[in-house]
Amino acid sequence: MNKILNPNEAIDVAERIRKDHKTIVLAGGCFDILHRGHIFFLEEAGRQGDILILFLESDENIKSRKGLERPINSQKYRSIVLSALSSVDYVIPLEGMTNNQEYDKLIVQISPDIIALTEGDPGLEQRKKQAKIVGAKIRLIKKIEGRSTTNLIKNNG
């Protein structure tokens, strides 16, 4: 089974999942250098429902938000690593999505039951709006303090 899907494939898969009356959990992020904070988040997010679908930020979006030296690992590499995790059912690389309207449209098409994010996520208000659009619940996952790709780079660079 291929766990890495383009957005159109993800829409079809989500439709089949809903027909099977399974709960879809949607999460997203950069996941540049995978660390225990990511693993904890993904495992906890996966426990919130039956199927965990993961939106994976593009290299371009990461570069614009975190600096020209980022990401360390390409989106293709990150997709492969994340798809190998048992807690992740599907990875959707988001190529070319640059605004909230595009995300909103894809979220409506996937129509998750739950949107999971880390406590303190700066995108919480936008995720609440997206959840309201599709009638999803928000689940906040505890953050493991001090664990981030940015901190790993600072401490090891």
Image (tube, helix red, strand yellow):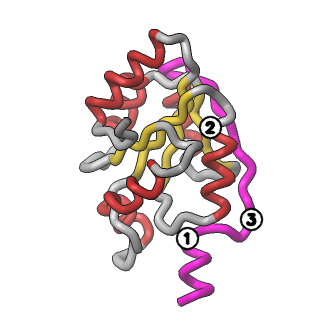
Q: Give the magenta part as a residue range.
A: 132-157
Which amino acid type is marked by label 3?
Glu
- What residue sits 48% from the left and 51% below the top? 84
Percent of width and height locating residue 130:
49, 30
Quarter residue 141 falls in: top right
The residue wearing badge 2 is 46
Contact between marks 3 and 1 (CB within 8 A): the answer is: no
Give me the disc on residue 145: 3
Who is closer to the viewer here, 33 or 109?
33
As shown in the figure, which amino acid type bears the numbered disc 2?
Gly
* Position in image of residue 97 (x %, y %): 29, 46
| Secondary structure state at the residue bearing disc 2 | helix
Compared to 21, does 106 lie above or below? Answer: below
Per the image, the residue denoted by label 1 is 149
Q: CA distance from mark 1 to mark 2?
A: 21 Å
Residue 101 appears left or right of 149: left
From this view, report whether residue 7 is shown above or below residue 109: below
Q: What is the crowding at mark 1: few (fewer than 14 residues within 10 Å), some, or many (at least 20)?
A: many
Instruction: Tell me whether circle 1 and circle 2 mark residues in contact (CB < 8 Å).
Output: no
Residue 105 coordinates in the image, percent (x, y): 34, 29
